């Protein structure tokens, strides 16, 4: 009789575990990795970064609003490109995605070099704010979920996912370290920034090497990275990645430049 009791108890536990596993599978496949949820999360991440940078800009309110409007227009442009399928494999394809990443970075660097007031404003944003603006990169967890569902390829998705999660989780602690100028804050911030930028560069490289329409594709087994060329995932290479790369370049500039070279011109 005792044996039957244990058998029934074991059966109940098995049924519970099966139900929990089914619920987890449903949640990850139909909720966590759903297009609307990813779109909402990425839009929220973009909005938070834009707001943090614009609010911390050492400039007049009108200049801050114009700065936020320019970044928002860039986001809308990326949204439109993704919605129209311009960079899909049957459109511009991987070269188009590459241009979406590279052109904003080149344009941002050019404007900072050519326009001293803009350079002064952007490089006047506190380093801690620039670092903390990477906190939304914890959304890299979506890469891991999509990889588990066989919708994104390896090693692209695991590398991008775990790298982004690590950067996102450490962004605020490092920002606090920098803001308070605690012991060895500068070398630690440089090491963190190097890793964070390298994570983006490696992710872009692996994404390109996993694209089916790329002539030199290295990873052809399983799914390709074509999912990144449509919405909502295109918002990552089309807006967030180049914006974060520019942020990392600004952090390097602030950490490595002489303190006496600080610019004080406030745009009006």
Image (spheres, helix red, strand yellow):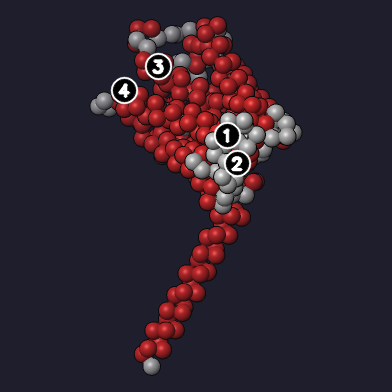
- Rendered location of residue 166, percent (x, y): 41, 39
Distance of label 1 from label 3 (alpha carbons): 37 Å
Q: Nearer the viewer, residue 72 or 247?
A: 247
- Residue at image coords 50%, 16%: 122
First in sequence, mark 2 or 4: give its number: 4
Q: Is residue 17 visible?
A: yes
Q: Which residue is mark 2?
A: 224
Q: Along the horizontal axis of the image, is 65 left or right of 140?
A: right
Q: Which residue is mark 1?
A: 217
Q: Nearer the viewer, residue 220 or 159?
A: 220
Q: Which residue is mark 3?
A: 254
Distance of label 2 from label 3 (alpha carbons): 38 Å
- Rendered location of residue 13, percent (x, y): 44, 75
- Residue at image coords 61%, 55%: 30
- Position of residue 43 relative to residue 251, above or below, is below
Element at label 4: helix
> Closer to the camera: disc 2 or disc 3?
2
Q: How many residues crowd around disc 4 within 10 Å: few (fewer than 14), some, or many (20 or more)?
A: some
First in sequence, mark 2 or 1: give its number: 1
> Closer to the camera: disc 1 or disc 4?
1
Element at label 1: loop
Q: How many residues crowd around disc 3 within 10 Å: few (fewer than 14), some, or many (20 or more)?
A: some
First in sequence, mark 1 or 4: give its number: 4
> Which label sits on residue 140?
none
Tag 2–tag 4 contact (CB < 8 Å)? no
Q: How many residues crowd around disc 2 within 10 Å: few (fewer than 14), some, or many (20 or more)?
A: many
Q: How many residues crowd around disc 1 within 10 Å: few (fewer than 14), some, or many (20 or more)?
A: some
């Amino acid at each position: 009789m005792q044996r039957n009791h244990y058998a029934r108890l074991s059966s109940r536990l098995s049924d519970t575990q099966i139900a929990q596993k089914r619920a987890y599978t449903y949640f990850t496949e139909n909720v966590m990795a759903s297009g609307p949820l990813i779109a909402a999360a990425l839009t929220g991440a973009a909005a938070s970064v834009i707001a943090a940078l614009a609010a911390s800009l050492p400039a007049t309110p009108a200049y801050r609003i114009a700065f936020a409007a320019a970044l928002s227009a860039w986001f809308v442009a990326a949204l439109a490109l993704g919605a129209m399928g311009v960079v899909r494999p049957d459109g511009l394809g991987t070269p188009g995605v590459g241009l979406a990443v590279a052109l904003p970075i080149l344009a941002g660097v050019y404007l900072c070099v050519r326009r001293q007031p803009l350079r002064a404003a952007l490089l006047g944003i506190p380093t801690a704010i620039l670092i903390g603006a990477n906190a939304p990169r914890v959304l890299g967890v979506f890469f891991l979920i999509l990889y588990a569902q066989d919708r994104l390829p390896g090693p692209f998705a695991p590398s991008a996912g775990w790298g982004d999660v690590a950067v996102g989780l450490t962004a605020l602690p490092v920002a606090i370290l920098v803001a308070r100028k605690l012991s060895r804050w500068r070398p630690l911030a440089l090491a963190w920034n190097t890793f964070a930028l390298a994570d983006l560069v490696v992710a872009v490289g692996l994404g390109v090497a996993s694209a089916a329409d790329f002539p030199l594709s290295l990873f052809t087994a399983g799914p390709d990275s074509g999912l990144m060329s449509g919405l909502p995932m295109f918002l990552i290479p089309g807006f967030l990645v180049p914006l974060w790369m520019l942020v990392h370049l600004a952090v390097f500039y602030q950490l490595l430049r002489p303190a006496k070279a600080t610019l004080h011109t406030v745009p009006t």
